[in-house]
Image (tube, rainbow, N blue to C red):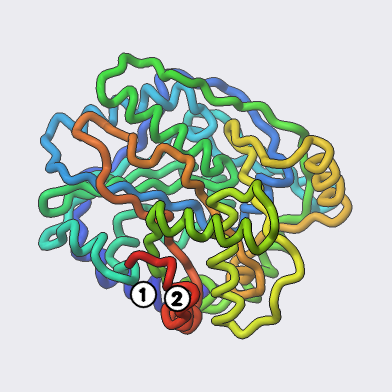
């Protein structure tokens, strides 16, 4: 039985402030009519929510700019055909299913909305992410496996007082961080008048087909999730370049290593504060970062390690569920290498980005404890 969470209830209350001006399905000019098998790395995201990316622009839209966005979205989908498709699940005789992407050009969702009495300071100013921001994204409460019938990409352009917020919902089974930003930058490239061509084409290659028991994994998720796990609090921490360099230098001295990246130093700093705030035993294993291999994302692992990981997954298949968010697992996404602020759709670059910088999603008590951790907050600029 489906139980409505408190966040979903509150969202329905504030959604009344959002006026939907139009809602359309945008398709590519032509269909590729292709089917793409999914890898183990893709399949593990079936039961979690689609990824949200939000960009805020200090610019008021005019009428023809919405039409330009629709037209350029259709043009860029010609190069990113999987995003215009749907997931396909084929039931087998042994009660297992195989999952793939069918590039049938069913289209992506494009929503044009507006909200009154909401300004940029209401979005980027608060310490905790305002609940109203969730209403700037379509498909709240959805899960990636619903891509069987729902669009794999949904975009909502929301006009605010003196600005515009573009909210993206990417199905994480189909795309990873690198490919999401590749799509956004390609769309912006066409939208600002760079013909109907993009400077870099995506890779659509896949490894092999997977067969797994989806229903048992879905039932496990429904039986092991509570409201706090599904809807953790979100707090924003800002780290300047100078602060990160100090963390990097400190890590090099502590571990006696010269090759430590800024990202590794920052994630380790956060992880230590989480361990301290949740009163857990110090970790004995190092962090490992592996991005999604969808639409051209390349893992930071050797081919041999990746092959061994996939073969191990074949012997013991598993799919991520939301309850892992409240376990002793620390997961990070996105990367400071992505060209976030270079996405100009024709009216200038974004002035705010809602996904990292640094957005931490944890139970409220843990986030509050971190804010009183002097060792952690010494590196935080806000």
Q: Decide: is 243 above or below 367.
A: above
Residue 5 badge: 2
- In which quadrant of the rendered image does the C terminus lie? bottom left
Pinpoint residue 322: horizontal percent, then vertical percent: 59, 67
Q: Secondary structure at mark 1?
A: helix
9 relative position to 30: left or right: left
Q: Residue at x 47, y 83 (%)?
A: 369
Q: Secondary structure at mark 2?
A: loop
Q: Decide: is 354 above or below 184.
A: below
Q: Nearer the viewer, residue 193 or 317?
A: 193
Q: Residue at x 27, y 65 (%)?
A: 132
Using the rendered image of the protein, determine whether residue 150 is visible from the camera's viewpoint: no
Q: Give the spatial CA distance, label 1 vs label 2.
A: 6 Å
Q: Nearer the viewer, residue 371 or 74?
A: 371
Q: Residue at x 53, y 67 (%)?
A: 270
218 relative position to 103: left or right: right
Pinpoint residue 275: horizontal percent, then vertical percent: 61, 76
Count of numbered labels shown in the rendering? 2
Residue 9 badge: 1
211 relative position to 139: left or right: right
């Amino acid at each position: 039985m489906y139980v409505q969470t408190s966040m979903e209830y509150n969202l329905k209350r504030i959604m009344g402030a959002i006026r939907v001006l139009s809602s359309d399905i945008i398709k590519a000019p032509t269909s590729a009519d292709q089917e793409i098998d999914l890898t183990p790395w893709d399949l593990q995201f079936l039961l979690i929510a689609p990824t949200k990316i939000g960009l805020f622009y200090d610019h008021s839209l005019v009428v023809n700019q919405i039409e330009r966005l629709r037209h350029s979205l259709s043009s860029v989908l010609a190069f990113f055909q999987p995003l215009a498709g749907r997931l396909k699940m084929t039931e087998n005789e042994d009660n297992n299913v195989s999952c793939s992407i069918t590039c049938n050009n069913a289209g992506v969702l494009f929503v044009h909305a507006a909200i009154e009495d909401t300004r940029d300071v209401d979005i980027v100013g608060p310490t905790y992410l305002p609940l109203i921001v969730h209403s700037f994204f379509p498909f709240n409460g959805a899960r990636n496996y619903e891509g069987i019938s729902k669009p794999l990409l949904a975009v909502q352009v929301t006009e605010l007082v003196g600005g515009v917020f573009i909210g993206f919902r990417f199905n994480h089974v189909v795309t990873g961080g690198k490919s999401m930003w590749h799509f956004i930058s390609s769309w912006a490239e066409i939208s600002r008048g760079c013909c109907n061509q993009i400077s870099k084409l995506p890779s659509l290659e896949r490894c092999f087909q997977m067969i797994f028991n989806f229903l048992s994994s879905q039932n496990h998720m429904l039986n092991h999730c509570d409201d706090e796990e599904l809807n953790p609090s979100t707090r924003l921490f800002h780290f300047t370049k100078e602060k990160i360099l100090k963390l990097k230098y400190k890590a090099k001295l502590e571990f006696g290593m010269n090759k430590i990246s800024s990202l590794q130093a920052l994630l380790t700093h956060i992880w230590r504060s989480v361990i301290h705030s949740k009163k857990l035993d110090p970790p004995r294993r190092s962090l490992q970062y592996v991005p999604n291999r969808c639409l051209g994302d390349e893992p930071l692992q050797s081919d041999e390690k990746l092959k061994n990981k996939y073969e191990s997954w074949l012997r013991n298949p598993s799919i991520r569920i939301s309850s892992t968010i409240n376990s002793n697992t620390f997961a990070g996404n996105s990367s400071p290498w992505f060209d976030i602020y270079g996405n100009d759709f024709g009216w200038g670059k974004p002035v705010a980005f809602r996904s990292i910088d640094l957005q931490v999603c944890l139970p409220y008590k843990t986030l509050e404890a971190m804010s009183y951790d002097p060792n952690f907050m010494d590196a935080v600029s806000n």
